[in-house]
Image (cartoon, rainbow, N blue to C red):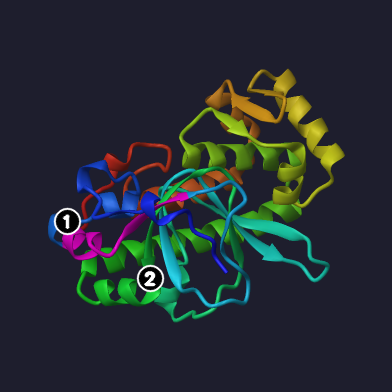
């Protein structure tokens, strides 16, 4: 069961201009008013699970800062990341497609914040808010593209390329150049051994695109990291641009208005 922070940390009725979640920020004022009174700001802790595989999705989270991993749990109990969710998206959005239980586990990979709403309340608002419904469906499609591309990437590309792709995606969602990431965590995310992560990170460090020390990875050269990544990063980013009119790394204010 989800353990939320103390109630005093919940801040209801967010101000539209201060919201960093791209979907909420892109809503017209009248639709934001419909959902704002049902949103509760929650602080998320590193390692906190928001949804567990096979359990009911009772709450949906509009991520405002930090990023969350969607993990599939293998039969031996080992987790494998299938997608990342940051301020561009929503954890639990599959409820709009009729899902009642979570296929994957969603776990916070950094401390951050989100706006929580119950599944029932979200469905009630979406029925009255066509722009919100459209944005959520667009995001659902982009997330599914990310999952499919991640599967292809894991099967066919070298670890160095995959690591560069993952760091770019994490950078997009966290908005910070320094990431607190241990080799053990990266190994779990990429489904490889810890020793191979060390080799791949060392190669990127020697190329001058990252600095890795004491469990922290600092991105020194964003363009260089993009050049080191496989085409999978750009494939997902371009799909996002085609539906939202921006690159995920750009400001939320750049979201194109809906027709």
Residue 28, disc: 1
Residue 43 horizontal/vertical position (percent)? 45, 48
Point 20% across, 58% down: residue: 32
Residue 50: image quadrant is bottom right
Q: Are marks 1 and 2 in contact (CB under 8 Å)?
A: no
Image quadrant occupied by the N terminus = bottom right
Residue 215 horizontal/vertical position (percent)? 70, 30
Residue 232 horizontal/vertical position (percent)? 59, 47
Q: In this view of the protein, which residue sits in the foreground, 139 or 17?
A: 17
Q: Is residue 34 magenta?
A: yes
Q: Is residue 153 magenta?
A: no
| Mark 1 to mark 2 CA distance (whole Å) | 21 Å
Which element type, helix, strand or loop, lies under badge 2? strand
Point 86% across, 38% down: residue: 195
Q: In this rendering, does residue 5 appear at all?
A: yes
Magenta stretch: give its range: 31-43
Residue 72: image quadrant is bottom right
Q: Is the residue marked by circle 1 packed among few (<14), some (14-19), or many (20+) residues within 10 Å?
A: some
In the picture, measured across the screen, residue 62 lies left or right of residue 229, that is left
Point 13% across, 60% down: residue: 30
Instruction: Kindly report which numbered mark, 1 or 2, lies closer to the viewer in this rendering.
Output: 2
Q: Earlier in the sequence, mark 1 or mark 2?
A: 1
Q: Which residue is mark 2?
A: 118
Q: In this view of the protein, which residue sits in the foreground, 145 or 192?
A: 192
């Amino acid at each position: 069961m989800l353990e939320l922070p103390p109630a005093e940390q919940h801040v209801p009725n967010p101000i539209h201009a201060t919201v960093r979640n791209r979907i909420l920020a892109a809503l017209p004022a009248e639709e934001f008013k419909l959902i704002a009174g049902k949103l509760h700001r929650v602080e998320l802790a590193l390692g906190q699970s928001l949804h567990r595989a096979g359990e009911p999705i009772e709450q949906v989270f509009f991520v405002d800062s930090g990023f969350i991993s969607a993990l599939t749990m293998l039969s031996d109990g080992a987790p494998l990341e299938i997608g990342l969710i940051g301020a561009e998206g929503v954890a639990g959005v599959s409820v709009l497609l009729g899902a009642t239980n979570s296929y994957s586990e969603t776990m916070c990979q950094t401390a951050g914040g989100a706006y929580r709403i119950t599944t029932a309340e979200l469905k009630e608002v979406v029925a009255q808010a066509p722009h919100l419904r459209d944005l959520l469906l667009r995001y659902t499609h982009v997330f599914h593209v990310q999952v499919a591309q991640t599967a292809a990437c894991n099967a066919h590309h070298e670890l160095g390329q995959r690591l560069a792709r993952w760091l770019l995606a994490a950078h997009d969602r966290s908005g910070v150049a320094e990431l607190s990431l241990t080799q053990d965590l990266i190994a779990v995310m990429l489904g490889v051994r810890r020793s191979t992560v060390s080799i791949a990170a060392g190669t990127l460090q020697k190329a001058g695109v990252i600095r890795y020390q004491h469990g922290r990875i600092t991105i020194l050269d964003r363009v260089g990291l993009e050049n080191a990544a496989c085409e999978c990063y750009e494939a997902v980013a371009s799909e996002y641009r085609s539906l939202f009119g921006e690159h995920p790394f750009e400001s939320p204010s750049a979201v194109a208005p809906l027709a």
